[in-house]
Image: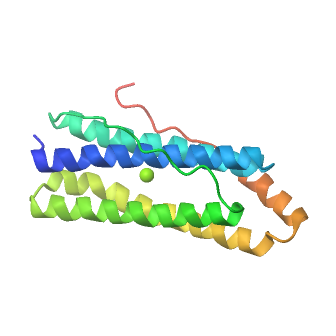
Amino acid sequence: MINTKLQDAINKQINAEIYSAYLYLSMRAYFASNDLPGFANWMYVQALEEFTHADKFYNHIISRGGKVKLTAIDAPETNWKDALAVAENVLSHEQKVTGLINDLVNLATDEKDHAAKSFLQWFVDEQVEEESNAMEMVRKIKMVKNDPGAMFMLDKEAGARVFVPPIAKGA
Ligand code: MG
């Protein structure tokens, strides 16, 4: 059984993960409207991954006899200066999410909830990957942003990213 403190904190994290998906869908729309369909695809895959993160938290609460409470999602930004500004926003957002995950680990530690700690470890590792991906995107865009031909190729590369759905529980 999960305690109320952790249940409430994880419910908040479900909201944060869906907000991430919402923000990334907004970035997808920005790229789609600015002739960068590959980057739009990259953000779409990113958004779908965020929904699977929300789902992991959902399943953790349910499987431990807790109660899931979904709350209103804030509206994301809709406009950015350029592709680099979007990538930098992805990075700063993921750094913020890393902080939220660390706060959850600290709470699980304080509450001596070893099941939650073990569960959260996946997210600790995932955030290393998320920040690394975002840093790579920032770096690449910085390299090519003034070269339309290179930008075209980078967009093409981003267009190759595919969403790999996690194996459904009990399917
Ligand atoms: Mg996430």
Residue 164 lies, in percent from the top left, at 56, 41
Which residue is at the far top? 171
The quadrant the N terminus occupies is top left
Q: Residue at x 55, y 51 (%)?
A: 77
Q: How many marks?
A: 0
Residue 144 lies, in percent from the top left, at 80, 70
Name the foreground residue: 104 vs 124: 104
Q: Is residue 138 left or right of residue 116?
A: right
Q: Quadrant of residue 11?
A: top left
The quadrant the C terminus occupies is top left
Q: Is residue 124 left or right of residue 82?
A: left
- Up-down relation of residue 147 to residue 28 (above or below): below
Q: Quadrant of residue 149?
A: bottom right
Q: Residue at x 59, y 42 (%)?
A: 163
Tell me the colour scheme of the image: rainbow
In this view of the protein, can residue 129 be seen by the observer? no
Q: Residue at x 33, y 43 (%)?
A: 14
Q: Is residue 92 left or right of residue 143?
A: left
- Up-down relation of residue 62 to residue 120 (above or below): above
Q: Residue at x 30, y 59 (%)?
A: 121
In this view of the protein, can residue 32 be seen by the observer? yes
Residue 19 lies, in percent from the top left, at 44, 46
Which residue is at the far right? 149
Residue 138 lies, in percent from the top left, at 64, 69
